[in-house]
Amino acid sequence: MSSIRVARQRKFLLATAALTSIAFVDMPAAFAQQVRDPLPPVEVTPAQPRGPAKPARSEGRLARRAAATRPAAVPASQKPAVPTTAQTPLNTNVVAVSASRLGLTVREIPATVEVISAETMREQGYRTVSEVSQGAVGVTSGDNPAEPSAFSMRGFTNSQINTLYNGIKIGPQNMTSRIMDTANLEAVEFVKGPASVMSGEGAAGGAVNVVTKQPHTGPVLNEADFSWDSLNSFRSHYGSGGSTNVQGLDYRFDISRSSLNGFADDTNTRTLDVSGQLNYRISDSLKIWGAIEYREDRGKAYWGAPLVPIAFSGSHATSGIVSGNYISNYNGSNLGAVTIDDRTFNTNYNVLDNRNVAQEVWLRGGFELKLAPGLTLKSQAYGYGAERTWFNNEVEAFNSGSNLVDRERFYVAHSQRLAGNITDLTWDTNIAGFDNRFVTTLAVSDLDFVRPGAANFPHDLVTLVDPVRGYYGLLTTQQQTARIDNEALSFEDRLKLTRSFALVGGLRVEHIGLDRNSTDVNGLEKANFPFSKSWVPVTGRIGYTWDAVPGLTFFSQYATGADVSANNIFLLVPTQPLDLTTSRTYETGVKHLFWDNRAEWSFSAYDILRKNVYAAAGGMQLNIAGRQESKGVELAASVRPIDPLRLWGNIAYVDARYADCNFVGGSFSGNTPPNVPRIVANAGASYRFFTPLPVELGIVGRHVGDRFNTDANVVTLKAYTVADVYAFVDIPRTVFNAVDQARLTFRVRNITDKRYAIWGDPFYPDQILLGAPRTYEISAAFKW
């Protein structure tokens, strides 16, 4: 390592230590800020006087119980400022921390941002982040036990979409994302379109941010929930949070455990998530916080069903799942017209000793300091460590010469360490009579990534039906490393030219330094290694919001992004194109909340262009694709016409294609990127019966259009429509005296037992990942 790099890292560590020496801190509390006009100043919530007893709960029944056993509550004028803003039908009154550091609500951001709350996750039965994404507008994903960490949004997939943890990026989505249970989450945020201003390199298609549950000021609230389904999966969770007897100290603690069985033979994912956070208000001007989280998942994996010639399957050939003619990318077999054989629906071709394991640890802390009226400093330091292992057979390619299935082993492991700091300085002021908020952010991080991987790839053949799965066999390894240092300085500003019209803009200047090495099985450096590369992308956005009438907001924006043109930054080699791509978007739309907050809808239209991109020809080969163009519209609406009835729905249309994509032997020009449907739609309805035991019945439908599994567009994953139904009953406290709220739910997923293709991995084009069949689930949730 060069002396310059060492000096830079020492400066980074000293800066981090200085910024966090005041104390261990909390996530920005802006997530639950109430909408105000004009833009409110950033203020630290002052410490509030509290006696040894906790304040009474606001609910009438709980207040009466508390009054009988506790001293009188703190006067209203002295109560902590607990957010009370009710969730709007589309949840646009919350602050999305991944979309802006200005503390703006979703309605105030000149872009399309969607926030799925914990309440919605619970009502819709979303168990994982993948399931949450499938309910979002225009978003598709893989699913357990297939690819639970793959997303598609606005025509972009995989490493073109950043995945964030409480606003922090840890690496390319298709390398670092894991299956994540929703039990410990407060929200999942979807930022649509190029989003490099906020999350840096890799956000050509947008960003997905998971937000963990945060402490609140007030009485301690506890929750517990359990579920079981017909695949013998179970989930359990316990959470607790509120104010302690130490004045100014609030806490949150969650622990969840799940065992999710897949529909394919011998597939299972076990997860454990333990998280905790403390917030401490030292004074009216200073708040500090600290958080820790441990996550673990251990799985037996499923890698899909092989494409099979219709001529071979005969009466076992299926329709409505895939179509097209295919020549095997793996063994060169001309399969002709292909199908999924119905005898392989539940077949797992993985080796018996397969494993898929990850362990992750987060340490975060920071402070929020009010330096002067209208001037606030926030800082967060973080450390992250992860160990991941894949030990599988990952290729299932039908061989028309032998009528057997070719298999090939794959092993890789990750050892990742990440440390960084994000510091914001927010200034509220008045410029020539106009209210203005300005935020400058300095973000620095240092990442160390070690990737031992297979140096040999054992191969064998098994029968299509009832394969003898065998074991992995001989393993020899080689190693790759990547060290990435990142420094970014960004600016955001919101200027209110009138009470109803505001300009919002941002600029990010970023330095990315990459050092890579690769050694063979003998530990010798490979040709052209080691090598170093640096980039200095400059990205930005400018837009406006106009409140034409109260509740009706028009917006438009122009935004840019940058990401690695080929593969991802962890795996670049000197012979690949090392330039960054550039992307830009034009977007305009409207957001409307009306009818006394009973109805809300939003519409957006966008045009995204990404230049200097490369596409997978199938398998591991990359081909030049000069441009990727993506144009589309999105519409979402939700309404409660009468108190018992709720209706909601969304639809997205996208036309995504390559241009100037010509190479020796062919062209992808005009083709659609993999896993990008033209149409994605969701709709649902629920009706609540206000009886002594309130009952709610609901149905949710989802339609996903045709997609392709590779850039060659020769095999089509056929459109599908699935529906879930549910019923829950809220049991009053008169039945369960020990709890304040109890809910029992019965849910049927994929009620028609539709067989469909949910995802196609372009690097494994000989096989298709299938969606889950009909399952039944019962669950119970309690709050006290």
Image (spheres, rainbow, N blue to C red):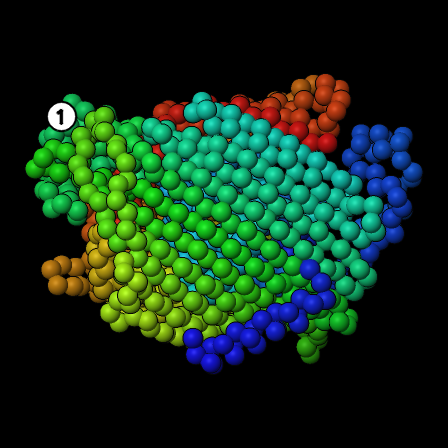
411 and 638: which is toward the camera: 411
Against 783, is 731 above or below?
above
Quarter in which the C terminus is drawn: top right
- The image position of residue 501, as x and y in percent, is 60, 65
Secondary structure, mark 1, is helix
Q: Residue furthest bottom?
A: 4
Residue, x 54% and y 69% (percent of image)? 444
How packed is label 1: few (under 14 Cα within 10 Å), some, or many (20 or more)? few
Quarter in which the N terminus is drawn: bottom left
- The image position of residue 485, as x and y in percent, is 47, 70
Q: Quadrant of residue 245?
A: top right
135 and 378: which is toward the camera: 378
Against 427, is 342 above or below?
above
Which residue type carries mark 1? Gly
Q: Which residue is mark 1?
A: 314
Residue, x 36% and y 46% (percent of image)? 390
Q: Is residue 186 left or right of residue 568?
A: right
Residue, x 55% and y 75% (percent of image)? 10
- The image position of residue 777, as x and y in percent, is 49, 24
- The image position of residue 772, as x and y in percent, is 37, 31
Q: Is residue 315 left or right of residue 782?
A: left
